[in-house]
Image (cartoon, rainbow, N blue to C red):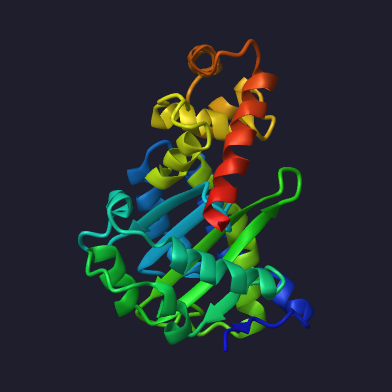
Amino acid sequence: MATSVSNCNSAKAFQLTSEEGERIVRIVAESLLIKRHFQLFLWLQGEVQHFLPHSLLLSASGDIPGSNVNIDVVSALPGVRTEQLARCRVDGFVKELYARWVEAGRSPLLVPQAIALARLGPCRCPVHAALRSLHSILVHGLRDERHGDDSFYVASHCRSVTDGHPPDRFKYLISLLIPLIDVAFRRVAVFRFPGASAAAGQSFGGEWPNFSAREHEILSYLRKGDTNVRIGLALNISPFTVKNHMRRILRKLGVDNRTQAATKYNEAVQESRNLVRK
């Protein structure tokens, strides 16, 4: 059975050493420089490893229980790249771990390998092979109460991800680190399952416009009510560029304003979810 890391019950667990405090400050400062996926990779291989040692970090966000899921994989393991997820899926694996995390009260969760890999499937691609070869698995994330979405992370390592820290202490450190990791991931573009846009197209009887990956990204933020400025910050593009994309989106949808575009996109997403449940 998966076991949730227990609650901190010591005041000492809420104190950083001077060395840890300096590391956290450097981690924050370096995260602000991230603009590309390779920079994210280098950042995760740096001092982040002191708090969360991992060989592979998988990120999932959006409607994780449904079909509109954003996936990214960062790893130094040979051949393990996000692009492979266009050909081999890990969504069943992610959803199983996500469900266990929610059941555990959205607390840091250490999952036994046998349980974690039960939904992984037989694929022999580098991503699946890497996950099967790693033995220590931690899952944790963040709940966005404003928009009703979660950001979810799966860290896996050939050794223990706790790295000798007592469980209470480890939970505290991970709770500090996950928000920083989440901000860093949001600074780079993410992979989207092809099935998500395909399902949306089916919901309009084949009339759903052929949007680019960037336009789908902007629509996903638009449906949450984000402004051009916030969308630009999240995607590392200027508000003017967002505005140009928005004009093309409105034209493709045949609507007059952002509210109508968000409504139409929400209807498509909801109908695609209904199709998945049938």
Residue sitting at 26 percent across and 69 percent down? 123
- Whether residue 78 sits left or right of residue 189 in the image: it is left
In the rendered image, the quadrant that contains the N terminus is: bottom right
In the image, 71 versus 6, the foreground residue is 71
**Does 156 sit above or below residue 73?**
below
- Whether residue 179 sits left or right of residue 161 in the image: it is right
In the rendered image, the quadrant that contains the C terminus is: bottom right
Where is residue 184? Give x, y as percent. 51, 46
Residue sitting at 55 percent across and 17 percent down? 239
Q: Is residue 9 visible?
A: yes
Residue sitting at 38 percent across and 82 percent down? 135
**Does 233 sit above or below residue 161?**
above
* Snapshot quadrant of residue 91: bottom left
Where is residue 180? Give x, y as percent. 57, 52
Where is residue 218? Give x, y as percent. 53, 28
In the image, 153 versus 250, the foreground residue is 250
Residue sitting at 52 percent across and 46 percent down? 68
Where is residue 168? Give x, y as percent. 67, 81
* Snapshot quadrant of residue 254: top right
